[in-house]
Image (cartoon, rainbow, N blue to C red):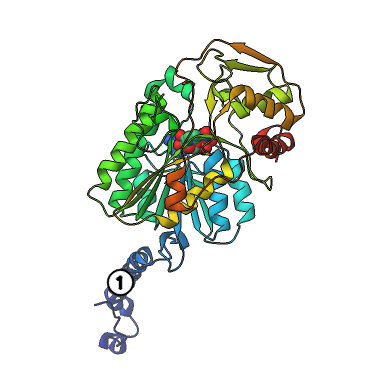
Amino acid sequence: MLSFSRTRSPGRNTSPLAGGMDYLEPKRKSNVLGRLILIVSLTALCITMLKNAPSFTSPTSFSRSQEGVTHVLVTGGAGYIGSHAALRLLKDSYRVTIVDNLSRGNLGAVKVLQGLFPEAGRLQFIYADLGDAKAVILHIPKILLYEVDKIFSENAFDAVMHFAAVAYVGESTLDPLKYYHNITSNTLVVLEAVARHKVKKFIYSSTCATYGEPDKMPIVEVTPQVPINPYGKAKKMAEDMILDFSKNSDMAVMILRYFNVIGSDPEGRLGEAPKPELREHGRISGACFDAARGVIPGLQVKGTDYKTGDGTCVRDYIDVTDLVDAHVKALEKAKPRNVGIYNVGTGKGRSVKEFVEACKKATGVDIQVDFLPRRPGDYAEVYSDPAKILRDLNWSARFTNLQESLEVAWKWQKSHPHGYASS
Ligand SMILES: NC(=O)c1ccc[n+]([C@@H]2O[C@H](COP(=O)([O-])OP(=O)(O)OC[C@H]3O[C@@H](n4cnc5c(N)ncnc54)[C@H](O)[C@@H]3O)[C@@H](O)[C@H]2O)c1
Protein backbone atom coordinates (compact mmCIF):
# COMPACT_ATOMS: atom_id res chain seq x y z
CA MET A 1 0.00 0.00 0.00
CA LEU A 2 2.80 2.35 0.81
CA SER A 3 5.20 1.28 -1.95
CA PHE A 4 5.69 3.39 -5.12
CA SER A 5 5.65 1.77 -8.50
CA ARG A 6 8.59 2.98 -10.64
CA THR A 7 7.19 1.54 -13.88
CA ARG A 8 6.81 4.18 -16.56
CA SER A 9 3.49 4.96 -18.15
CA PRO A 10 3.16 3.89 -21.78
CA GLY A 11 1.78 7.33 -22.61
CA ARG A 12 5.12 8.87 -21.85
CA ASN A 13 6.79 7.00 -24.69
CA THR A 14 4.01 7.42 -27.13
CA SER A 15 3.56 11.10 -26.75
CA PRO A 16 6.73 12.76 -25.58
CA LEU A 17 6.06 16.11 -27.23
CA ALA A 18 2.88 18.07 -27.56
CA GLY A 19 0.34 17.55 -24.90
CA GLY A 20 2.69 15.17 -23.16
CA MET A 21 2.62 17.23 -20.04
CA ASP A 22 -1.13 17.20 -19.93
CA TYR A 23 -1.13 13.44 -20.18
CA LEU A 24 1.47 12.87 -17.51
CA GLU A 25 0.19 15.34 -14.91
CA PRO A 26 -2.54 13.19 -13.27
CA LYS A 27 -0.11 10.30 -12.67
CA ARG A 28 2.54 12.61 -11.19
CA LYS A 29 -0.05 14.17 -8.95
CA SER A 30 -0.96 10.75 -7.60
CA ASN A 31 2.72 9.96 -7.00
CA VAL A 32 3.21 13.16 -5.03
CA LEU A 33 0.09 12.38 -3.02
CA GLY A 34 1.35 8.87 -2.37
CA ARG A 35 4.71 10.19 -1.20
CA LEU A 36 2.94 12.61 1.08
CA ILE A 37 0.80 9.85 2.56
CA LEU A 38 3.90 7.74 3.04
CA ILE A 39 5.78 10.52 4.81
CA VAL A 40 2.84 11.33 7.08
CA SER A 41 2.28 7.65 7.87
CA LEU A 42 5.94 7.02 8.58
CA THR A 43 6.16 10.09 10.76
CA ALA A 44 3.07 8.99 12.70
CA LEU A 45 4.54 5.51 13.05
CA CYS A 46 7.86 6.89 14.26
CA ILE A 47 6.16 9.12 16.80
CA THR A 48 4.08 6.21 18.10
CA MET A 49 7.13 3.97 18.33
CA LEU A 50 9.19 6.66 19.99
CA LYS A 51 6.42 7.39 22.45
CA ASN A 52 6.26 3.74 23.41
CA ALA A 53 10.01 3.40 23.47
CA PRO A 54 11.51 3.61 26.93
CA SER A 55 13.79 6.48 25.94
CA PHE A 56 10.92 8.78 24.98
CA THR A 57 9.32 8.71 28.45
CA SER A 58 12.90 9.24 29.75
CA PRO A 59 13.04 6.43 32.22
CA THR A 60 15.82 6.81 34.66
CA SER A 61 17.34 4.44 37.13
CA PHE A 62 14.65 5.76 39.46
CA SER A 63 11.82 4.31 37.41
CA ARG A 64 13.18 0.76 37.28
CA SER A 65 13.69 -1.73 40.07
CA GLN A 66 17.28 -2.84 40.19
CA GLU A 67 18.57 -6.00 41.78
CA GLY A 68 20.59 -5.19 44.88
CA VAL A 69 19.50 -1.53 45.02
CA THR A 70 16.84 -0.34 47.46
CA HIS A 71 15.08 2.81 46.31
CA VAL A 72 13.68 4.84 49.20
CA LEU A 73 11.22 7.69 48.88
CA VAL A 74 12.03 10.23 51.58
CA THR A 75 9.09 12.62 51.97
CA GLY A 76 10.10 15.86 53.67
CA GLY A 77 13.71 15.18 52.73
CA ALA A 78 14.50 18.90 52.49
CA GLY A 79 13.63 19.28 56.16
CA TYR A 80 15.76 18.83 59.24
CA ILE A 81 15.36 15.12 59.98
CA GLY A 82 14.53 14.05 56.42
CA SER A 83 17.73 15.56 55.01
CA HIS A 84 19.84 13.81 57.65
CA ALA A 85 18.04 10.55 56.87
CA ALA A 86 18.66 11.02 53.13
CA LEU A 87 22.36 11.63 53.82
CA ARG A 88 22.64 8.44 55.83
CA LEU A 89 20.72 6.40 53.24
CA LEU A 90 22.91 7.71 50.42
CA LYS A 91 26.04 6.95 52.42
CA ASP A 92 24.74 3.41 52.85
CA SER A 93 24.26 3.07 49.06
CA TYR A 94 20.49 3.38 48.98
CA ARG A 95 18.89 5.13 46.01
CA VAL A 96 16.95 8.13 47.26
CA THR A 97 14.08 10.22 45.92
CA ILE A 98 13.21 13.28 47.98
CA VAL A 99 9.72 14.72 47.68
CA ASP A 100 9.20 18.06 49.39
CA ASN A 101 7.11 21.18 48.81
CA LEU A 102 9.80 23.33 50.47
CA SER A 103 7.13 24.92 52.66
CA ARG A 104 9.38 24.37 55.65
CA GLY A 105 12.47 22.69 54.31
CA ASN A 106 15.45 24.03 52.41
CA LEU A 107 16.49 23.52 48.81
CA GLY A 108 19.99 24.25 50.15
CA ALA A 109 19.94 20.95 52.06
CA VAL A 110 19.01 19.10 48.86
CA LYS A 111 21.82 20.87 47.01
CA VAL A 112 24.32 19.77 49.66
CA LEU A 113 23.16 16.18 49.17
CA GLN A 114 23.30 16.50 45.38
CA GLY A 115 26.85 17.86 45.69
CA LEU A 116 27.88 14.89 47.81
CA PHE A 117 26.20 12.30 45.60
CA PRO A 118 26.22 13.66 42.04
CA GLU A 119 26.35 10.25 40.32
CA ALA A 120 23.38 9.27 38.15
CA GLY A 121 20.77 7.16 39.87
CA ARG A 122 21.70 8.12 43.43
CA LEU A 123 19.46 11.05 44.35
CA GLN A 124 16.59 12.87 42.70
CA PHE A 125 14.50 15.71 44.03
CA ILE A 126 10.84 16.15 43.18
CA TYR A 127 9.17 19.39 44.18
CA ALA A 128 5.63 18.41 45.09
CA ASP A 129 2.95 18.86 47.69
CA LEU A 130 1.79 15.60 49.20
CA GLY A 131 -1.69 17.02 49.64
CA ASP A 132 -1.89 17.32 45.89
CA ALA A 133 -3.49 14.02 45.04
CA LYS A 134 -4.70 15.38 41.70
CA ALA A 135 -2.73 18.50 40.98
CA VAL A 136 -1.97 19.86 37.55
CA ILE A 137 1.57 19.26 36.40
CA LEU A 138 3.38 22.56 36.37
CA HIS A 139 6.66 23.04 34.61
CA ILE A 140 8.99 25.17 36.61
CA PRO A 141 12.58 25.35 35.35
CA LYS A 142 14.20 22.01 36.14
CA ILE A 143 11.44 21.16 38.59
CA LEU A 144 8.13 19.44 38.05
CA LEU A 145 5.12 19.79 40.27
CA TYR A 146 3.57 16.35 40.26
CA GLU A 147 0.50 14.81 41.66
CA VAL A 148 1.35 12.21 44.27
CA ASP A 149 0.11 9.17 42.41
CA LYS A 150 2.08 10.15 39.32
CA ILE A 151 5.24 10.22 41.40
CA PHE A 152 4.58 6.65 42.42
CA SER A 153 3.70 5.61 38.83
CA GLU A 154 6.94 6.98 37.48
CA ASN A 155 9.25 5.68 40.18
CA ALA A 156 9.95 2.20 41.45
CA PHE A 157 10.03 2.69 45.20
CA ASP A 158 10.97 -0.21 47.42
CA ALA A 159 10.29 1.72 50.60
CA VAL A 160 8.83 4.99 51.84
CA MET A 161 10.05 7.01 54.81
CA HIS A 162 7.28 9.49 55.45
CA PHE A 163 8.79 12.47 57.30
CA ALA A 164 6.93 15.33 55.63
CA ALA A 165 4.74 17.18 58.08
CA VAL A 166 4.14 20.40 59.89
CA ALA A 167 5.51 19.74 63.34
CA TYR A 168 5.08 22.42 65.99
CA VAL A 169 2.90 21.73 69.02
CA GLY A 170 2.23 25.44 69.65
CA GLU A 171 1.25 26.14 66.05
CA SER A 172 -1.08 23.13 66.09
CA THR A 173 -3.10 24.62 68.93
CA LEU A 174 -3.46 27.88 66.96
CA ASP A 175 -4.20 26.31 63.58
CA PRO A 176 -5.50 22.77 64.20
CA LEU A 177 -7.05 22.25 60.76
CA LYS A 178 -3.70 22.84 59.10
CA TYR A 179 -2.36 19.96 61.18
CA TYR A 180 -5.19 17.55 60.44
CA HIS A 181 -4.86 18.35 56.76
CA ASN A 182 -1.10 18.26 56.49
CA ILE A 183 -0.52 15.27 58.75
CA THR A 184 -3.62 13.09 58.73
CA SER A 185 -5.05 13.78 55.31
CA ASN A 186 -1.68 13.84 53.53
CA THR A 187 -0.66 10.56 55.15
CA LEU A 188 -3.86 9.08 53.69
CA VAL A 189 -2.88 10.34 50.21
CA VAL A 190 0.60 8.83 50.57
CA LEU A 191 -0.78 5.59 51.96
CA GLU A 192 -3.24 5.23 49.07
CA ALA A 193 -0.39 5.64 46.61
CA VAL A 194 1.74 3.19 48.58
CA ALA A 195 -1.12 0.66 48.49
CA ARG A 196 -1.89 1.16 44.78
CA HIS A 197 1.73 0.78 43.78
CA LYS A 198 2.44 -2.08 46.20
CA VAL A 199 5.41 -0.49 47.93
CA LYS A 200 6.86 -3.10 50.24
CA LYS A 201 7.99 -1.06 53.25
CA PHE A 202 6.59 1.97 55.01
CA ILE A 203 8.39 3.78 57.82
CA TYR A 204 6.35 6.44 59.57
CA SER A 205 7.62 9.42 61.57
CA SER A 206 5.44 9.56 64.63
CA THR A 207 5.96 11.30 67.90
CA CYS A 208 5.84 10.96 71.66
CA ALA A 209 3.16 13.68 71.46
CA THR A 210 0.72 10.85 70.64
CA TYR A 211 1.01 9.68 74.26
CA GLY A 212 -0.10 13.00 75.72
CA GLU A 213 0.69 13.20 79.39
CA PRO A 214 0.80 9.65 80.75
CA ASP A 215 0.65 9.02 84.49
CA LYS A 216 3.53 6.61 84.43
CA MET A 217 7.08 7.21 83.27
CA PRO A 218 9.00 6.02 81.37
CA ILE A 219 6.74 5.67 78.35
CA VAL A 220 6.56 2.21 76.81
CA GLU A 221 4.99 1.49 73.41
CA VAL A 222 1.81 0.13 75.04
CA THR A 223 1.35 3.24 77.18
CA PRO A 224 -2.15 4.48 76.27
CA GLN A 225 -2.09 7.15 73.58
CA VAL A 226 -4.13 10.10 74.77
CA PRO A 227 -2.78 13.08 72.83
CA ILE A 228 -3.60 16.50 74.24
CA ASN A 229 -2.86 18.79 71.27
CA PRO A 230 -3.85 18.74 67.60
CA TYR A 231 -0.31 17.81 66.52
CA GLY A 232 -0.34 14.66 68.66
CA LYS A 233 -3.93 13.87 67.69
CA ALA A 234 -3.23 14.24 63.96
CA LYS A 235 -0.22 11.91 64.25
CA LYS A 236 -2.24 9.38 66.26
CA MET A 237 -4.95 9.38 63.56
CA ALA A 238 -2.29 8.83 60.92
CA GLU A 239 -0.91 5.91 62.94
CA ASP A 240 -4.41 4.41 63.21
CA MET A 241 -4.94 4.61 59.45
CA ILE A 242 -1.60 2.91 58.82
CA LEU A 243 -2.39 0.16 61.33
CA ASP A 244 -5.85 -0.48 59.92
CA PHE A 245 -4.50 -0.63 56.39
CA SER A 246 -1.68 -2.95 57.41
CA LYS A 247 -4.16 -5.56 58.71
CA ASN A 248 -5.04 -6.60 55.15
CA SER A 249 -1.80 -5.83 53.45
CA ASP A 250 1.53 -7.50 52.84
CA MET A 251 3.33 -4.27 53.50
CA ALA A 252 6.01 -4.11 56.19
CA VAL A 253 5.30 -1.23 58.56
CA MET A 254 7.48 0.51 61.10
CA ILE A 255 6.09 3.33 63.23
CA LEU A 256 8.80 5.26 65.03
CA ARG A 257 7.71 7.56 67.84
CA TYR A 258 10.48 10.09 68.27
CA PHE A 259 11.10 12.07 71.37
CA ASN A 260 12.74 15.53 71.10
CA VAL A 261 15.23 15.65 68.29
CA ILE A 262 18.42 17.72 68.57
CA GLY A 263 21.90 17.91 67.03
CA SER A 264 23.11 17.78 63.46
CA ASP A 265 25.50 15.98 61.15
CA PRO A 266 28.81 15.54 63.04
CA GLU A 267 30.70 16.33 59.81
CA GLY A 268 28.95 19.69 59.54
CA ARG A 269 27.29 19.16 56.16
CA LEU A 270 23.69 19.59 57.29
CA GLY A 271 21.94 21.43 60.07
CA GLU A 272 18.57 22.56 61.37
CA ALA A 273 17.36 25.67 59.56
CA PRO A 274 13.68 26.45 60.10
CA LYS A 275 12.22 29.39 58.23
CA PRO A 276 12.59 32.66 60.20
CA GLU A 277 8.82 33.14 60.37
CA LEU A 278 8.53 29.87 62.30
CA ARG A 279 10.88 31.02 65.04
CA GLU A 280 8.06 31.90 67.40
CA HIS A 281 6.82 28.27 67.30
CA GLY A 282 10.33 26.93 67.25
CA ARG A 283 11.92 24.19 69.23
CA ILE A 284 14.13 24.68 72.21
CA SER A 285 17.47 24.11 70.43
CA GLY A 286 16.64 26.66 67.73
CA ALA A 287 15.66 29.20 70.37
CA CYS A 288 18.85 28.51 72.29
CA PHE A 289 21.03 29.16 69.23
CA ASP A 290 19.05 32.26 68.26
CA ALA A 291 19.57 33.63 71.77
CA ALA A 292 23.29 32.79 71.66
CA ARG A 293 23.63 34.59 68.33
CA GLY A 294 21.70 37.60 69.59
CA VAL A 295 18.91 37.15 67.01
CA ILE A 296 16.47 37.12 69.94
CA PRO A 297 17.16 38.89 73.24
CA GLY A 298 17.12 35.72 75.34
CA LEU A 299 15.32 32.50 76.13
CA GLN A 300 11.80 32.23 77.41
CA VAL A 301 11.19 29.17 79.55
CA LYS A 302 7.46 28.61 79.62
CA GLY A 303 6.27 27.00 82.82
CA THR A 304 8.17 26.64 86.10
CA ASP A 305 5.44 25.07 88.19
CA TYR A 306 5.24 21.62 86.65
CA LYS A 307 5.51 18.61 88.95
CA THR A 308 9.08 17.89 87.97
CA GLY A 309 12.42 18.08 89.79
CA ASP A 310 13.07 21.77 89.10
CA GLY A 311 9.54 22.80 87.98
CA THR A 312 10.41 23.02 84.28
CA CYS A 313 9.28 20.49 81.67
CA VAL A 314 11.25 17.30 81.29
CA ARG A 315 11.98 15.87 77.85
CA ASP A 316 13.99 13.08 76.30
CA TYR A 317 16.43 14.59 73.76
CA ILE A 318 17.51 12.29 70.97
CA ASP A 319 20.39 13.16 68.63
CA VAL A 320 19.41 13.23 64.95
CA THR A 321 22.34 10.95 64.06
CA ASP A 322 20.97 8.28 66.39
CA LEU A 323 17.46 8.86 65.06
CA VAL A 324 18.38 8.24 61.43
CA ASP A 325 20.33 5.18 62.50
CA ALA A 326 17.09 3.86 64.02
CA HIS A 327 15.39 4.44 60.65
CA VAL A 328 17.99 2.46 58.75
CA LYS A 329 17.74 -0.39 61.24
CA ALA A 330 13.94 -0.28 60.99
CA LEU A 331 14.18 -0.39 57.19
CA GLU A 332 16.55 -3.34 57.27
CA LYS A 333 14.47 -5.32 59.74
CA ALA A 334 11.01 -4.51 58.38
CA LYS A 335 9.22 -7.73 57.41
CA PRO A 336 6.19 -8.28 55.15
CA ARG A 337 2.83 -8.37 57.00
CA ASN A 338 4.53 -7.15 60.18
CA VAL A 339 4.12 -3.95 62.12
CA GLY A 340 6.80 -2.64 64.44
CA ILE A 341 6.06 0.26 66.78
CA TYR A 342 9.02 1.75 68.59
CA ASN A 343 9.91 4.61 70.87
CA VAL A 344 13.07 6.33 69.72
CA GLY A 345 14.60 8.10 72.69
CA THR A 346 17.51 7.91 75.10
CA GLY A 347 15.45 6.76 78.08
CA LYS A 348 16.67 9.73 80.08
CA GLY A 349 14.64 12.85 80.90
CA ARG A 350 16.33 16.28 81.05
CA SER A 351 14.68 19.40 82.37
CA VAL A 352 14.47 22.60 80.36
CA LYS A 353 16.74 24.23 82.97
CA GLU A 354 19.33 21.49 82.38
CA PHE A 355 18.99 22.02 78.66
CA VAL A 356 19.56 25.75 79.01
CA GLU A 357 22.71 25.16 81.05
CA ALA A 358 24.02 22.72 78.41
CA CYS A 359 23.22 25.28 75.74
CA LYS A 360 25.13 28.02 77.57
CA LYS A 361 28.16 25.74 77.84
CA ALA A 362 27.95 24.54 74.22
CA THR A 363 27.73 28.05 72.82
CA GLY A 364 29.93 29.76 75.40
CA VAL A 365 27.32 32.51 75.69
CA ASP A 366 25.71 33.54 78.95
CA ILE A 367 22.21 33.58 77.52
CA GLN A 368 19.57 35.64 79.27
CA VAL A 369 16.68 33.49 80.51
CA ASP A 370 13.15 34.69 81.33
CA PHE A 371 10.76 32.38 83.16
CA LEU A 372 7.14 32.73 81.99
CA PRO A 373 3.76 31.04 82.63
CA ARG A 374 2.93 27.71 80.97
CA ARG A 375 2.18 27.42 77.25
CA PRO A 376 -1.10 25.73 76.29
CA GLY A 377 -0.72 22.18 75.01
CA ASP A 378 2.56 21.40 76.79
CA TYR A 379 2.92 18.41 79.06
CA ALA A 380 5.12 18.19 82.16
CA GLU A 381 7.29 15.15 81.79
CA VAL A 382 7.98 12.84 78.91
CA TYR A 383 10.75 10.31 78.51
CA SER A 384 10.98 6.97 76.82
CA ASP A 385 11.67 3.40 77.70
CA PRO A 386 13.77 2.39 74.67
CA ALA A 387 14.06 -1.30 75.68
CA LYS A 388 11.85 -2.62 72.87
CA ILE A 389 13.85 -1.05 70.06
CA LEU A 390 17.07 -2.35 71.61
CA ARG A 391 15.63 -5.84 71.84
CA ASP A 392 14.06 -5.99 68.36
CA LEU A 393 16.26 -3.73 66.22
CA ASN A 394 19.47 -3.76 68.26
CA TRP A 395 19.35 0.03 68.41
CA SER A 396 20.22 2.31 71.27
CA ALA A 397 21.19 5.96 71.46
CA ARG A 398 24.93 6.60 71.33
CA PHE A 399 25.06 10.40 71.31
CA THR A 400 23.59 11.00 74.75
CA ASN A 401 25.73 13.89 75.93
CA LEU A 402 23.42 16.89 75.61
CA GLN A 403 26.21 19.43 75.58
CA GLU A 404 28.16 17.56 72.89
CA SER A 405 25.11 17.26 70.63
CA LEU A 406 24.48 20.97 71.04
CA GLU A 407 28.14 21.78 70.34
CA VAL A 408 27.94 19.96 67.00
CA ALA A 409 24.73 21.77 66.09
CA TRP A 410 26.13 25.13 67.25
CA LYS A 411 29.17 24.70 65.02
CA TRP A 412 26.89 24.41 61.97
CA GLN A 413 24.74 27.32 63.17
CA LYS A 414 27.78 29.56 63.57
CA SER A 415 29.10 28.75 60.12
CA HIS A 416 25.59 29.19 58.63
CA PRO A 417 24.21 32.38 60.21
CA HIS A 418 21.58 32.58 57.45
CA GLY A 419 20.86 28.86 57.34
CA TYR A 420 21.45 27.23 53.97
CA ALA A 421 21.47 30.65 52.31
CA SER A 422 24.94 31.10 53.84
CA SER A 423 26.38 28.00 52.12
N1 LIG B 1 11.86 17.60 65.22
C1 LIG B 1 11.37 16.87 66.19
O1 LIG B 1 11.76 17.05 67.37
C2 LIG B 1 10.34 15.79 65.92
C3 LIG B 1 9.87 14.99 66.99
C4 LIG B 1 8.95 14.00 66.73
C5 LIG B 1 8.51 13.76 65.44
N2 LIG B 1 8.95 14.55 64.43
C6 LIG B 1 8.45 14.28 63.08
O2 LIG B 1 9.54 14.16 62.20
C7 LIG B 1 9.15 14.60 60.90
C8 LIG B 1 10.19 15.58 60.36
O3 LIG B 1 10.24 16.70 61.23
P1 LIG B 1 11.35 17.85 61.07
O4 LIG B 1 11.68 18.29 62.43
O5 LIG B 1 12.41 17.40 60.17
O6 LIG B 1 10.47 18.99 60.39
P2 LIG B 1 10.87 19.97 59.18
O7 LIG B 1 9.83 21.04 59.17
O8 LIG B 1 12.28 20.37 59.29
O9 LIG B 1 10.71 19.03 57.91
C9 LIG B 1 9.45 18.70 57.38
C10 LIG B 1 9.58 18.73 55.87
O10 LIG B 1 8.35 18.35 55.29
C11 LIG B 1 8.06 19.22 54.21
N3 LIG B 1 6.60 19.25 54.04
C12 LIG B 1 5.66 19.68 54.91
N4 LIG B 1 4.45 19.56 54.37
C13 LIG B 1 4.61 19.03 53.13
C14 LIG B 1 3.72 18.68 52.09
N5 LIG B 1 2.41 18.86 52.18
N6 LIG B 1 4.23 18.18 50.95
C15 LIG B 1 5.57 17.99 50.80
N7 LIG B 1 6.45 18.31 51.76
C16 LIG B 1 5.98 18.83 52.92
C17 LIG B 1 8.62 20.57 54.64
O11 LIG B 1 8.85 21.44 53.56
C18 LIG B 1 9.89 20.14 55.33
O12 LIG B 1 10.97 20.08 54.43
C19 LIG B 1 7.76 15.17 61.05
O13 LIG B 1 6.84 14.18 60.63
C20 LIG B 1 7.63 15.40 62.53
O14 LIG B 1 6.29 15.34 62.96
C21 LIG B 1 9.86 15.56 64.64
Q: Position of residue 238 (x, y in %)?
A: 34, 36
* Residue 78 shows in the view: no
Residue receiving disc 1: 29
* Residue 190 shows in the view: yes
Q: Is residue 207 above or below residue 75?
A: above
Q: Cβ of disc 1 within 8 Å of ligand 1?
A: no
**Within 10 Å of the Cα at label 1, are there few (<14), some (14-19), or many (20+) other Cα atoms?**
few
Quarter residue 78 falls in: top right
In screen coordinates, is 161 left or right of 370?
left
Q: Residue at x 43, y 22 (%)?
A: 172
Quarter residue 131 falls in: top left
Nearer to me, 102 or 314: 314
Q: Secondary structure at mark 1?
A: helix
Nearer to me, 73 or 22: 73
Quadrant where the N terminus is found in the figure: bottom left
Q: Is residue 383 above or below residue 27?
A: above
Q: Position of residue 403 (x, y in %)?
A: 68, 34
Q: Is residue 121 above or below residue 76?
A: below
Q: Is residue 298 above or below residue 62?
A: above
Which residue is most to the top?
373
In screen coordinates, is 107 left or right of 190?
right
Quadrant where the C terminus is found in the figure: top right
Q: Residue at x 29, y 38 (%)?
A: 241
Numbered-mark total = 1
Three-letter code, disc 1: Lys
Quarter residue 418 falls in: top right
Q: Position of residue 341 (x, y in %)?
A: 38, 43
Q: Position of residue 159 (x, y in %)?
A: 40, 53
